Amino acid sequence: MNEARLEDSGAGLAPAEEGWFVSNVREARWFTHQTFGSVCRFDGPDAWFPQVGVNIRVLDPGQPNCFYHAESEQEAILVLAGECRLLVNGEERLLRQWDFFHCAAGTEHVCVGAGDGPCALLMLGAHSDDGTIVYPVSELALRYGAGVETETTSPAEAYAAFESPPPGRPSSWERLPWA
């Protein structure tokens, strides 16, 4: 396997082809959404990771990383900095720096930024060609602005009211441990 060429995607460096590569969080692709926080994507539009998704999410207090959902594939979340609320199977847990959440397939969940500053999460998720997702209605998630009002299995339907996030680092960049 050859080294992949990294190119500026307009949002930061991303692989332009399949292969191995080294990328720094400061230089990688970043997108910031007013509702769902910021995401650092290490894969690229032309070189998607087919087996494991990897990203870093930065959430300000009150920001969910997505809508409450359950997937047919396992995920993992490690809190790198700050605090977040983990809404999991109808329960709420406070996670702090270095807390690890193993999300077994079928577990309903979402993270919401908490505390008085940004929260940085390392997020990993398995990919498969036959993976499924469901966005169930959850009163707990709705209280945090992290839920859907009508159950759906379509991400396009769940996020229909939102535009794609524009390129950009989080506004709280200077307050993060790696800045």
Image (spheres, rainbow, N blue to C red):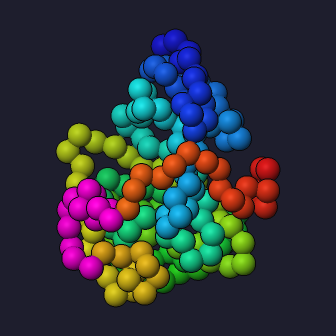
| Residue 9, percent from left and from top | 54, 31
On the rendered structure, is 105 left or right of 18? left
Front one among 16 and 110: 16
Examine the rendered structure and indicate whether residue 117 appears above or below residue 129.
Answer: below
Front one among 51 and 58: 58
* Residue 105 visible in the current orientation: yes
Q: Is residue 164 magenta?
A: no
Front one among 60 and 18: 60
Residue located at (34% from left, 43% from top):
127
Front one among 65 and 90: 65
- How many circles with numbers are drawn on the protein? 0
Residue located at (53% from left, 42% from top):
41
On the rendered structure, is 105 left or right of 47? left
**Range of magenta residues:** 149-161
| Residue 125, percent from left and from top | 42, 50
On the rendered structure, is 62 left or right of 153? right
| Residue 15, percent from left and from top | 52, 26
Prevalent SS, magenta region: loop
In terms of image quadrants, where is residue 163? bottom left
Residue located at (73% from left, 55% from top):
173
Residue located at (56% from left, 77% from top):
62
| Residue 176, percent from left and from top | 75, 58
Examine the rendered structure and indicate whether residue 59 appears above or below residue 14.
Answer: below
Outermost residue on the top side: it is: 2
* Residue 57 visible in the current orientation: no
In terms of image quadrants, where is residue 48? top left
Q: Is residue 155 magenta?
A: yes
In terms of image quadrants, where is residue 147? bottom left
